[in-house]
Amino acid sequence: MAPGLKIFADIAGDGTPRLDAASGEEVVCVERAASVALGRRAPEAPGTLFVTTRRVIWLSEAEKGTGYAVEFLDVTLHAVSRDPETYPSPCLYTQIEAEAGSDEEAGDLDTEPLSELQLAKISEMRIILSDAAQLDSLFDAFCHCAELNPDPTAEQNEEDGWFHGEDMTDGGWIHGDEIMVDGIDPEFFTPNPIGENDGSDLSRSVLELQINDQRFEDADEDEEVRENGH
């Protein structure tokens, strides 16, 4: 099955999504009056968000019987964003594994329904809640479900020694639990939380790393030791 967002229409008579009972899928949390913004498009009219043990499902209230869904295995990153310079509304920002292409190809700020082909190219989704105070709870639910759906290739990558992350900034990769950029030791970096990048691109701010001046102090100390040794 191709990765990414998909149109969802498997809805029961009571307006809830039909789950995959055979795989043990269960609802973890439900958020009413939740909007989703796909790629560069404007937010959809409020609907209902269902977070299950396998998927994120959003159902439209304006157009009954329609919605979107994405498997947790295809959600490559999620984070709370509250910086108004990055996005006008507090939201849960997610990156989604998508087919080759761009969000622009999936439609700009129009409100025309998206086709399956357009959805498959969308790599970002923002979830906007009517009560922004619930974003932290939603984030926790995403974390829990992500743990329930580990990357099936992660074990093989770990055996190979390195994890190469598509979501890392340029030159970045993961070795075990350590983040490295351009070959510099991870102890010299401090992650910059999402939404705290003074308005620069959101996806790059997720793992934006700043070089710690400590490395220069260490270099000075080494120089002093060499001088004292003469």
Image (cartoon, helix red, strand yellow):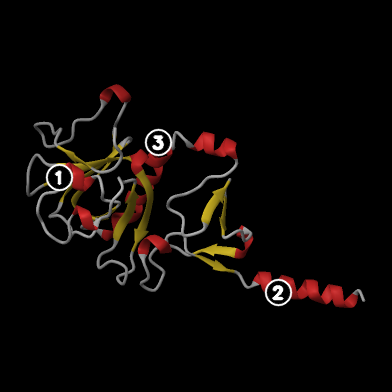
In this view of the protein, can residue 230 be seen by the observer? yes
Q: Amino acid at mark 1?
A: Ser
User: Residue 115: which numbered mark, if any?
Assistant: 1
Secondary element type, mark 3: loop
Which one is in front in this view, the residue at disc 1 or the one at disc 3? 1
| Residue receiving disc 2 | 217
Foreground of the two, 170 or 137: 170
Q: Amino acid at mark 3?
A: Asn
Estimate the x, y position of residue 190 in percent, counting from the top left.
Answer: 55, 64
Left or right: 103, with 143 as reference point: left
Relative to 203, say whether 64 is above or below.
above
Estimate the x, y position of residue 224 in percent, counting from the top left.
Answer: 82, 77
For the residues labelled 3 and 2, say whether their Cβ atoms are less than 8 Å apart: no
User: Residue 149: which numbered mark, if any?
Assistant: 3
First along the sequence among labels 3 and 2: 3
Estimate the x, y position of residue 100 in percent, counting from the top left.
Answer: 31, 48
